[in-house]
Amino acid sequence: MDRRYVIGLVVLVAAGIGLVAFTAIWSPQTTSPGSDQTYPAGAGPDHINFSALEEDDMNVSHTPRAHWDSYAIVYTAPPERRLVEGDYYINSVTGEILAKRWHNASVYRNGTTYAFVQPADGLSSEHQREQLESDDAYVYDNATDAYYRYDPHYGQIAPTNIGRHPDILGGYTWTATNRTTRHGVPVITYRVSDVRATAADIPPPLSGTLQLGAEDGIVYAFDITLDGDERDYRYTYDVRPAPFPDHSWVDTAREVAHENASERADRRQLSQFP
C-alpha cells in the first residue's frame, strides 16, 4: 500500500477516536435506569402508578419552587380537544399564580386574592359578552375594553386544580429508558409501551415519552401522540423555569371593582330615600 495512504488512514482513525472521546466528555450525562436504582414511590423500571405518585403531596404548584425562582407549566393539545385549564406561571418567592384561559383571559391568585381579566376582543360571540354583563361579579371597564373580577377573600386554591394535564398518561404503560437531568432536576425518562389492561375506550399510543422527577415523582414533561379514528392527536406538557408574566392588570381589576362597589353603595343609599 502506498505510504501516503497508510499515513492518511492512521490520521483518520486517530481523529475518529478523538471525536468519540470529546463527545463522551461533553455530551449530556445519562445513566441506565436499572432495577437497582431508586425510584419515587409508585414508579419502577417498567411501571408507573400515577395514583401512588400523588399520595405524597408532591405537586407542580409547590414542589418545583425548590428548583426555580419562577416557572411555567405549559400544555398543548389538538385545537378541537383543548381544555379550559391552560398554561400556569408560578412565582416561587411570592407564591403568586397566574393562569392563561380561553379567549385570552387571565386568572391571578395570591393567597386568598383572586383576579380575572377578559379582553372584550377575545370573546368570540355576543352570548359570551351577555353572560359577563349579566354577572354582578364581573365589571366592564371602557378604558381598557375588558371585563374584570377582583375578590380579596376568594379562598385557598387546591393543588389539584393545577397541572391536571398528566391525567392523560394514566391509561398507558411505561418503561424507563435512562436517567438524566432537566433544567438541573434529576429525572427518569420513560417510553410509552402499551395501553393499560384496565383501561377502556382510549386510543392506542403511536409514540410517547415522559420525564419523571427521580426524587419527587413529579411529571416534568411529556410528549405523546395517540392514534385517533381519522387523524393523530399529539399532546405535550412542559414544567420549566420561566419569568413570571407582567400582571399590572391586577391593579386595574382592584380599582375597577372598588369603583363599582362604591357606585352600588351610593345607589343603595339613594334608593332608601324617596
Image (spheres, rainbow, N blue to C red):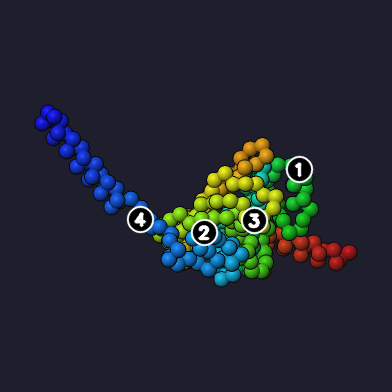
Q: Amino acid at mark 1?
A: Glu
Residue 245 left/right relative to 200: left
First in sequence, mark 4 or 3: give its number.
Answer: 4
Q: Nearer the viewer, mark 4 or mark 3?
A: 3
Residue 12 coordinates in the image, percent (x, y):
20, 37
* Residue 201 seen in this snapshot: yes
Say which label, 1 or 3, has the lower sequence index: 1
Residue 125 location (% of width, % of height): 74, 42
CB atoms at circles 3 and 2 under 8 Å apart? no
Residue drawn at 66 percent across, 69 percent down: 155
The numbered mark at residue 197 is: 3
Residue found at the very far left of the displayed protein = 3
Q: CA distance from mark 4 to mark 1?
A: 55 Å
Where is residue 173? Give x, y as percent.
57, 55
Q: Nearer the viewer, residue 250 or 156?
A: 156
Residue under circle 4? 29
For this orientation, the residue located farthest to the front is: 1
The residue lying toward the viewer, choosing from 163 and 258, is 163
Rendered view: 242 above or below 274:
above
Crowd class of label 2 (few under 14; some 14 to 19; many from 20; radius 10 Å): some
Marks 2 and 1, how far apart at CA: 51 Å
Which residue occupies 71% across, 55% down?
139
Checking the image for residue 126, the label placed there is: 1
Task: Determine the secondary structure under disc 3.
Answer: loop
For marks 2 and 1, the one nearer the N-term is 2
Q: Residues within 10 Å of mark 4 (few under 14, many from 20)?
A: few
Quarter of the figure with residue 177? bottom left
Quarter of the image that includes the C terminus:
bottom right
Give the Cα separation between the discs numbered 3 and 2.
Answer: 14 Å
**Which residue occupies 74% across, 52% down?**
132
Q: What residue sits 46% from the left and 58% below the top?
A: 188
Q: Amino acid at mark 4?
A: Gln
